[in-house]
Image: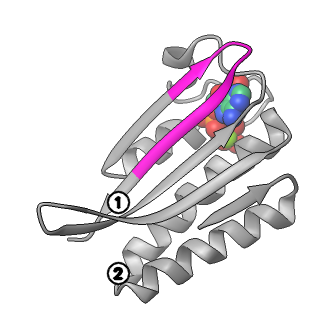
Amino acid sequence: MRVPIDCDSDVVAARQKGRELASQCGFPSTDMAVVATAISELARNIVRYAVRGEIILRLVQNNGKRGIEVVAADDGPGIPDVGLAMQDGYSTSGGLGLGLPGTRRLMDDFEITSDFGKGTKVTVRRWRR
Ligand SMILES: Nc1ncnc2c1ncn2[C@@H]1O[C@H](COP(=O)(O)OP(=O)(O)OP(=O)(O)O)[C@@H](O)[C@H]1O
Ligand SMILES: [Mg+2]
């Protein structure tokens, strides 16, 4: 499922889609909340820093374990120093700087690729307990 992101209401829509998907496949509500929070943070970053992009949601399986994968992708300015951006409190917009590091702590898997000038792709997964 793809959700285009280019304004605040798209962030809300993407979060809702994530909740729906999680509940459809029987995830407990704690997982739904975690996935919804991750979607919010990644989608908010798209709107704030890249203007537009998309959230891709899908169900994944690994060795019989089921999970939800969230990919946040944009063709925005990219992040010059990903290591810095992953630190608690680092923000270029006067924010709390907790969106990316908080999302990494919440989710089971976290991968980020970003090149300055080439956009950003964040892939996160939450496996069902
Ligand atoms: N999609 C993106 N494109 C370009 N830069 C990004 C993107 N996402 C994050 N960044 C950069 O990484 C920094 C850290 O992001 P993070 O979400 O952790 O904090 P924040 O957005 O500044 O504050 P918060 O999320 O706590 O409100 C941002 O300030 C911004 O410089
Ligand atoms: Mg953020």
Q: Quadrant of ligand 1?
A: top right
Q: Is residue 99 visible?
A: yes
Q: Is residue 115 magenta?
A: yes
Three-letter code, disc 2 = Phe
Residue under label 2, please give it.
Answer: 27
Q: Residue at x 59, y 67 (%)?
A: 1
Percent x, y for residue 81?
58, 12
Q: Is mark 2 within 8 Å of ligand 2?
A: no
- Magenta stretch bounds: 113-124
Q: Is residue 96 visible?
A: no
Secondary structure category for the residue under label 1: strand
Q: Earlier in the sequence, mark 1 or mark 2?
A: 2
- Tell me the quarter of the picture where residue 91 sits: top right
Secondary structure category for the residue under label 2: loop
Q: Residue at x 44, y 86 (%)?
A: 23
Q: Are marks 1 and 2 in contact (CB under 8 Å)?
A: yes
Q: Is residue 89 above or below residue 25?
A: above
Q: Nearer the viewer, residue 32 or 74?
A: 74
Q: CA distance from mark 1 to mark 2?
A: 10 Å
Q: Is residue 105 above or below residue 18?
A: above
Label number found at residue 97 = none
Residue under label 1, please give it.
Answer: 126
Q: Is residue 122 above or below residue 22?
A: above
> How many numbered discs, if any?
2
